[in-house]
Image (tube, rainbow, N blue to C red):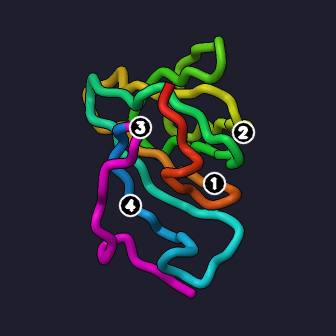
Amino acid sequence: MKTSRRNIEPFVTLDGSTIRELMHPASHACRNQSLAEASVAPGAGTMLHRHLRSEEFYHILAGVGEMRLGDERYPVSAGDTICIPPRTPHSIRNTGDHPLVFLCCCSPPYSNEDTELL
């Protein structure tokens, strides 16, 4: 199965990031995970949140930012990958002058019902 980013409309998630669902069981034949491309504008950030069941990976494609993972904060940039265990509070903030773009992989797949804003 193949999808094209060009054919997928972006939308804003509960945490405030703009995403494109590249693969999700609601729209594709995958079952156990989802993959999205997220973008955070310069100076903006996502709301602190956690996923009750999903483990999540962020893979930074472009830009620079600051990741909050639990009580830790650290810089992130293109090429970095972050593992976010279930129930771990997290957010990401763009500290640069260009969009912060990253892939989000969730297993089980992303859902608003699994997302708790903190």
Q: Which residues are magenta?
A: 1-15
Image location of residue 49, percent across then percent down: 52, 31
Q: Measuring 67% from the left and 29% from the top, which residue is drawn there? A: 88
Give residue 109's position: percent from left, percent from top: 62, 61
| Cα distance between the residues tagged 4 and 1 | 13 Å
Upstream in sequence: badge 4 or badge 3: 3
Upstream in sequence: badge 1 or badge 3: 3
Kind of element beneath mark 1: strand
Residue type pointed to by label 3: Asp
CA–CA distance in space, label 4 to label 3: 14 Å
Instruction: Residue under label 1, please give it.
Output: 106
Residue 86, numbered circle: 2
CB atoms of marks 2 and 3 within 8 Å: no
Earlier residue among tags 4 and 1: 4
Q: Nearer the viewer, mark 1 or mark 3?
A: 3
- First along the sequence among labels 4 and 2: 4
Viewer-closest of 109 and 72:
109
3D distance between C-alphas at marks 2 and 3: 16 Å
| Mark 1 or 2, nearer chain start | 2
Q: CA distance from mark 4 to mark 2?
A: 22 Å
- The crowd level at tag 4 (other Cα within 10 Å; few <14, some 14-19, many 20+) is many
* Type of amino acid at the residue the image marks with label 4: Arg
Disc assigned to residue 20: 4
Asked if the magenta segment contains residue 6, the reply would be yes
Q: Amino acid at mark 1?
A: Cys
Pointer 3 residue = 15
**In the image, which is nearer the foreground, mark 1 or mark 2?**
2
The Cα–Cα distance between marks 1 and 3, rounded to whole angstroms, is 15 Å
**Quick one: SS at disc 3?**
loop
Q: What is the residue that sits farthest to the bottom in this orientation?
A: 1
Q: Quadrant of the N terminus?
A: bottom right
